[in-house]
Image (tube, rainbow, N blue to C red):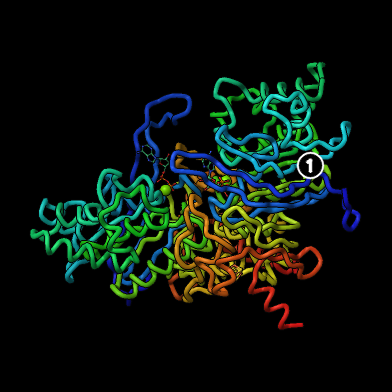
């Protein structure tokens, strides 16, 4: 996929399972397959958007890539300085250098900042833990520089996080993520807790920083408008698996997986009344991680046939450009039937 | 009560002002809000967090916290089907009149379904409680039949199974459906829904919006739907009030507001929404941060952030409502100037 582009991270068959105790509300298999065999390439300088309903495994995938949770299986290749490193088997020293290159910004700007540290110390912490800077002067200079970049007032550096609004706290979190000059940042729903006007500020900032520093993002979100707005490539996730991946254009103008189509139809459009057109075939999302046979979307799918209970579809390409991948046994039927649906709706 | 275009007003808020006293001082949460809710109409209230949406709706049912103080001149006028006109603001916390208003003629749906259920009761207990209080249906079979019908109306796939469950056994979307079913059980005249879908995923949100819209029309109820999400409001509301720092700054039909917004704040809010068609362009955003409600700006509340500010005027006096066309009203000096120049 996208062979001529520069791959920064290559994720092969990544699995992250959480073990659970047995009980009526836990599944009896003993683990939740939060990420279940994900393959992805993330290209240098691009933003990969990851969408899906809550609980589908987005955060776990982001953490798995950064090794903040221990993968159950799979490989992650990280390309730095022209060499490809398998991050699963890094030595202590290599791991430290990997940790400097990759950062994560979390959804909740209230919970992710230590309330007992000043903004200056919060931003400086990664420099002290992982960086090579020793002198206070040098550190202050760097903190000042990233703070200004993130539109924070330098006089705010001596304050504590509680004194700030949600948008300001998220800018502090971004400054902290930037301080080690990383090449890759996982943005885990960074604007989901913010109001739309503040959200616009943060999105504008993330886009500017990406351009200025050639950053690569994995942008996790549940608001499809936001993900469409910021991403170059979009992956759609459902219960631990990628259902469809393609350029933002492919996903939003030519969605092919029944799940992608359901998601897109459900997005409330501010410019017109669109929800009325939603066909109410879909049953609610249920987190069932136990049965690994078959397609995990089948209980909600209007196209499901007998074979979908037995055979789990894997990602395959439908166009010659090799850019648009779909995991559905009946993708061709979906395209045809949606064509008729569209014609009828007009 | 006046009727406009044949619609009868069921609930009217007049000059609502609410302050909360806190350790840091007085928070002016709502500042002179007025609107009339007509029968069978959905009124959307949009605004960023902290704009006073929840305080406004909570004042209707007397649910404000102890530290709240409502202005003396404020009125919430409800047209009770039997008792006639009642000013709900004047009812004390324990006034007996509440018993056949709250949960009977006016009911509420909250954002967090989990917070409104106690884990020790089954779903059916909530139904029976509402029926005991308001509907006086004593027959056991009738009660069950009535409840199950409501549960299937809100799209619960297995009403009987759901009836015997505990709230924590249901997903967020299912809980929200159950809460809607309970709220609608008494066929209320007014339903107040405060961000009822904000905690839900987009597919479930769409289902709940469709459902609320359908039930509201079938039962002829009036709905107050509060949200910070303009897209959601677009789907459900007939009329919209835009709130900023405790004031309604623009009011109109949903089409008027989304197609031809006048107020600088409404325009900024609409422009800040990312749209697929406008990718690769910068989003408009309201400059600066929202002022602390502890020290509200003088004059027009937006003047500290407004791109259209008229210096010497906006920071000194507060604009009045100006009618643009029909229901469409705006409070802004700049719009006044534009209208004058246009004429
Ligand atoms: N630390 C954990 N222990 C056990 N289960 C977890 C843990 N973190 C997440 N999960 C479960 O894994 C699944 C995926 O979670 P998550 O990655 O947070 O999803 P998302 O970010 O898409 O909402 C969910 O079912 C969640 O309950
Ligand atoms: N119980 C309370 N005590 C003190 N301040 C409050 C209380 N409830 C709300 N406020 C303040 O009143 C303002 C309006 O709040 P709210 O009505 O909850 O806004 P919204 O629902 O639009 O987010 C906010 O500044 C909020 O901090
Ligand atoms: S594989 Fe079958 S169940 Fe899965 S999305 Fe395709 S048609 Fe639906
Ligand atoms: S009154 Fe003045 S400050 Fe307020 S919105 Fe209008 S132009 Fe802006
Ligand atoms: Mg998450
Ligand atoms: Mg609120």
Q: Nearer the viewer, residue A76 or B23?
A: B23
The image quadrant where one finds ligand 4 is bottom right
Left or right of residue A321: residue B336: right
Q: Which residue is tagged 1?
A: B77
What residue is shown at x 71% (from left), y 35% (from top)? B183
Q: Position of residue A5 (x, y in %)?
A: 32, 75
Location of residue A21 by image quarter: top left
Quadrant in the picture for the N terminus of chain A: bottom left
Secondary-structure class at tag 1:
strand
Q: Nearer the viewer, residue B131 or A52?
A: B131
Quadrant in the picture for the C terminus of chain A: bottom right
Reply above or below: A214 against A112: below
Task: For label 1, count other residues whose C-alpha is less than 10 Å away and answer few (under 14), some (14-19) or many (20+).
Answer: many
Q: Nearer the viewer, residue A334 or A174?
A: A174
Q: Position of residue A94 (x, y in %)?
A: 13, 57
> Is residue B241 in sight in this rendering?
yes
What residue is shown at x 8% (from left), y 58% (from top)? A134
Identify the chain of the residue marked 1, using the numbered disc in the image: B
Q: Nearer the viewer, residue A179 or A33?
A: A179
């Amino acid at each position: 996929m996208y062979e001529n582009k520069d791959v920064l991270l290559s994720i092969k068959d990544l699995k992250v399972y959480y073990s659970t105790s047995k009980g009526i509300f836990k599944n009896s298999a003993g683990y939740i397959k939060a990420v279940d065999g994900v393959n992805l390439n993330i290209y240098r300088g691009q933003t990969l958007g990851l969408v899906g309903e809550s609980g589908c495994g987005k955060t776990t995938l982001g953490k798995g890539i950064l090794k903040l949770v221990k993968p159950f299986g799979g490989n992650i290749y990280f390309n730095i300085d022209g060499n490809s490193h398998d991050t699963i088997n890094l030595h202590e020293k290599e791991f430290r250098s990997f940790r400097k290159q990759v950062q994560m910004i979390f959804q909740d700007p209230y919970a992710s900042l230590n309330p007992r540290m000043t903004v200056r110390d919060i931003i400086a912490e990664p420099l002290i833990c992982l960086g090579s800077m020793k002198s206070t002067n040098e550190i202050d200079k760097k903190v000042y520089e990233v703070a200004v970049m993130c539109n924070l007032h330098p006089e705010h550096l001596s304050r504590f996080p509680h004194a700030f609004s949600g948008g300001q706290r998220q800018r502090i979190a971004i400054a902290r993520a930037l301080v080690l000059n990383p090449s890759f940042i996982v943005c885990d729903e960074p604007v989901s807790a913010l109001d739309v006007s503040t959200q616009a500020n943060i999105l504008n900032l993330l886009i500017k920083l990406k351009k200025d520093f050639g950053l690569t993002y994995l942008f996790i979100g549940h608001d499809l408008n936001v993900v469409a707005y910021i991403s170059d490539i979009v992956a759609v996730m459902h219960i631990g698996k990628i259902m469809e991946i393609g350029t933002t254009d492919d996903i939003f103008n030519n969605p092919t997986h029944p799940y992608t189509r359901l998601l897109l139809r459900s997005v409330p459009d501010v410019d017109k009344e669109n929800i009325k057109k939603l066909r109410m075939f879909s049953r609610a999302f249920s987190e069932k991680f136990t049965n690994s046979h078959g397609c995990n979307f089948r209980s909600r799918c209007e196209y499901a046939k007998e074979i979908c209970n037995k055979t789990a579809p894997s990602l395959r390409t439908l166009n010659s450009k090799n850019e648009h991948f779909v995991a559905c046994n009946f993708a061709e039927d979906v395209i045809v039937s949606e064509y008729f649906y569209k014609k009828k709706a007009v | 009560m006046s009727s406009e275009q044949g619609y009868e007003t069921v609930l009217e808020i007049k000059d609502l002002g609410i302050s909360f006293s806190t350790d840091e001082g007085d928070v002016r949460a709502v500042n002179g809000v007025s609107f009339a809710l007509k029968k069978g109409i959905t009124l959307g209230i949009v605004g960023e967090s902290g704009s006073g949406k929840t305080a406004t709706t909570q004042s209707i049912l007397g649910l404000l916290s102890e530290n709240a103080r409502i202005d003396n001149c404020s009125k919430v006028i409800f047209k009770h089907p039997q008792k006639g006109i009642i000013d709900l603001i004047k009812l004390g916390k324990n006034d007996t009149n509440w018993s056949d208003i709250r949960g009977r003629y006016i009911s509420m749906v909250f954002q967090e379904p989990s917070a409104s259920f106690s884990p020790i009761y089954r779903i059916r207990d909530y139904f029976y409680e509402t029926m005991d209080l308001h509907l006086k249906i004593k027959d056991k079979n009738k009660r069950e039949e009535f409840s199950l019908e409501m549960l299937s109306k809100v799209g619960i796939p297995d009403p009987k199974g759901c009836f015997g469950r505990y709230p924590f056994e249901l997903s967020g979307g299912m809980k929200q459906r159950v809460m809607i079913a309970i709220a609608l059980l008494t066929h209320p005249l007014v339903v107040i829904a405060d961000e009822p879908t904000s905690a839900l995923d987009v597919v479930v949100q769409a289902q709940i919006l469709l459902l609320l819209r359908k039930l509201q029309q079938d039962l002829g109820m009036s709905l107050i739907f509060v949200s910070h999400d303009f897209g959601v409001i677009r789907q459900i509301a007939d009329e919209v009030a835009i709130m900023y720092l405790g004031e309604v700054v623009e009011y109109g039909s949903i089409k008027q507001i989304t197609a031809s917004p006048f107020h600088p704040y409404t325009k900024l809010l609409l422009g800040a929404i990312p749209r697929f068609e406008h990718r690769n362009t910068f989003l408009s955003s309201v400059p600066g941060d929202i002022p602390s409600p502890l020290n509200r700006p003088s004059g027009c509340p937006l003047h500290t952030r407004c791109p259209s500010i008229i210096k010497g005027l906006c920071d000194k006096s507060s604009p009045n409502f100006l009618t643009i066309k029909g229901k469409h009203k705006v409070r802004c000096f700049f719009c006044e100037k534009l209208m004058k120049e246009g004429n």
